[in-house]
Image (cartoon, rainbow, N blue to C red):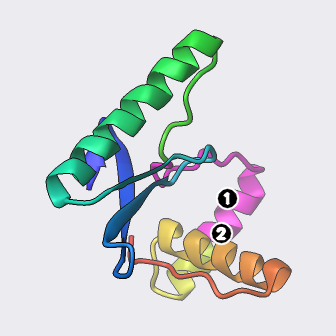
Amino acid sequence: MQYKGYTASIRFEEEAKLLFGEVVGIADTIFFEADSVDSFIQAFHDAVDDYLAWCAEEGREPDKPFNGRILFRCESDLHKSAIQAAEAKNMTLNQWLTQAVSRQIEAEAGDPVVVRAA
């Protein structure tokens, strides 16, 4: 579910008969809940609007959802080597870099990274 560029996750708690939501893809934490689908949608919209209003009151930029783009600058020789490595594996540079970053995160964090095809 999306609103103003923000995405919500949805979880249903059967015992409480409540829908719980969280805005995902940002560093700040925004939770909300409701007892029906319509009120859940409204609660999500209200939570995002409240967050944006709070940021404005505090004079700070609201977190923007991650868009999947990373500007990466490197030496020209490294750029050339990366393209050659990607071509050798019949991959685009983007695919190769995504795979390389995922492997590094897994090596450092020990958790597998789920990568969607780009």
The quadrant in which the N terminus is found is bottom left
In the picture, measured across the screen, residue 9 lies left or right of residue 45, that is: right
* Nearest the eye: 113 or 89: 113
Q: Quadrant of residue 111?
A: bottom right
| Residue farthest to the front, as pictured | 16
**Amino acid type of the residue that numbered disc 1 sits on in the rendered structure:** His
Q: Which residue is tagged 1?
A: 79
Snapshot quadrant of residue 77: bottom right
Tell me the residue at 51%/54% (across/down).
25
Residue with the mark numbered 2? 82
Depth check: give the residue in front, 34 or 89: 34
Q: Is residue 81 above or below residue 106?
A: above
Q: What range of the chain is rendered magenta?
A: 66-83
Residue 6's place in the image compared with 82, above or below, is: above
Measured from the top left, where is residue 80 in percent x and y?
A: 66, 62
In the rendered structure, find residue 36 and report the number of the disc placed on it: none
